Image: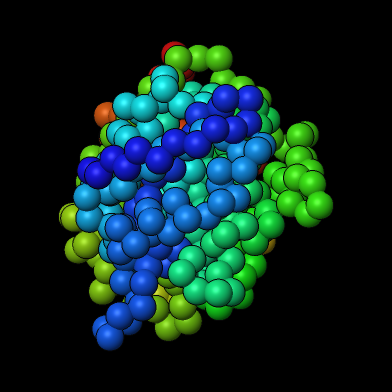
Amino acid sequence: MLFIDVCWTGLDMKRILIINTGGTIGMVKTKEGYKPDGKSFSNLLKSMDVLNAEGMPFWDLVELEKLLDSSNMTVAEWNKIGKLIADAYDNYDGFVVLHGTDTMAYTASALSFMLEHISKPVILTGSQIPLCEIRSDGRDNIITSLLIAASDIVHEVCIYFGGKLFRGNRAIKYSSEGLIAFVSPNYPVLAEAGISISYNRAYLREKDTEGFCYVPFENVPIGVIKVFPGIQFELFESIMTERLKGIVIETFGTGNIPGYDGALLPIIEKAFANGTIVTVCSQCPQGSVMLGEYETSMALKNAGAVSGLDITTEAAVAKLYYLFSKGYSTDKIKYLMGKNLCGEMKDDNDAADPEKLI
């Protein structure tokens, strides 16, 4: 990694670490299109007088050795970001992660699980227009993210973008072109930045008093399958039952699947028997999976699939990586996939913990 010492005087002597992973915000225009450029970006930050203004916190900048377009983000990069935060945890009051928008919601979800019992703010942000461009939205996103990270109000992993603060594991990318790029379909916005920053304190997580712990992810094989009319489930049988440890199925509505050939249910039963966890999410951004509400979803429940309730696909994927990396049993993972661990889903699954059953 490249550590760039750029520390400014500011808000109540709070210290914030900016972690640049790449993405549009730090890209420069080349003949081959926009590309990440760490040196140009760090010089651009140094030249922004507002970051040295009264009321701003101290900040340092650290960059990944190889800056990425976020479409190239992998579990290895998640671990690098998490370790950077863990290693610097005692030396900073908060963290701002600069990240491309394409996979920002995945990384935010991953960090929310990976950084167990976090009690400091980790704010992911970026831009739709590079900071080097005149109309860049990155300027406000960086400034406000730094102020939120230094506020002593937020104690969780969040995304700040387009004037709004979202819980990281509740957000999804909504627009590829608009400056309001993210939404949180099933959880309220945590803060809005207008003339002042207004926090929705009732929905912020309370400060965790348990000891902080960094949990690196293992790169276990996980897949996402989106159901569509006419899907031939038998084509997926070998990969679902022999290769994948975790599967997220994006179903219709509240958890419904085509039942015309009955092919999926024995596949799920076989997959679960082989130690594979199948979690059901909805293709609808808003609302919740309710397995058993309709006949076409009751069969999924009976076959051993887990209801993801209102969890996003991004958070479900990250949660599977996390739980497998903890080394839990198949039954324990299945149980925890239906339980709210760090604000990623609502609390209404009354299944019993298999490890507490007598």
**Quadrant of the rendered structure where residue 11 is?**
top right
Where is residue 134 drawn, in percent x and y? 55, 74
Closer to the camera in the image, 131 or 80: 131
Relative to residue 333, is residue 179 depicted above or below?
Answer: below
Residue at the image position 25 percent from the left and 65 percent from the top: 237
Q: Is residue 276 left or right of residue 168?
A: left
Residue at the image position 74 percent from the left and 51 percent from the top: 192
Residue at the image position 42 percent from the left and 22 percent from the top: 91
Where is residue 6 drawn, in percent x and y? 40, 40
Q: Is residue 247 visible?
A: no
Relative to residue 106, is residue 25 depicted above or below?
Answer: below
Q: Quadrant of the C terminus?
A: top left
Residue at the image position 22 percent from the left and 55 percent from the top: 66
Closer to the camera in the image, 284 or 93: 93
Q: Is residue 312 left or right of residue 22?
A: right
**Quadrant of the rendered structure where residue 34 is?**
bottom left
Q: Quadrant of the N terminus?
A: top left
Closer to the camera in the image, 169 or 328: 169
**Quadrant of the rendered structure where residue 163 is?**
bottom right
Relative to residue 184, is residue 55 depicted above or below?
Answer: above
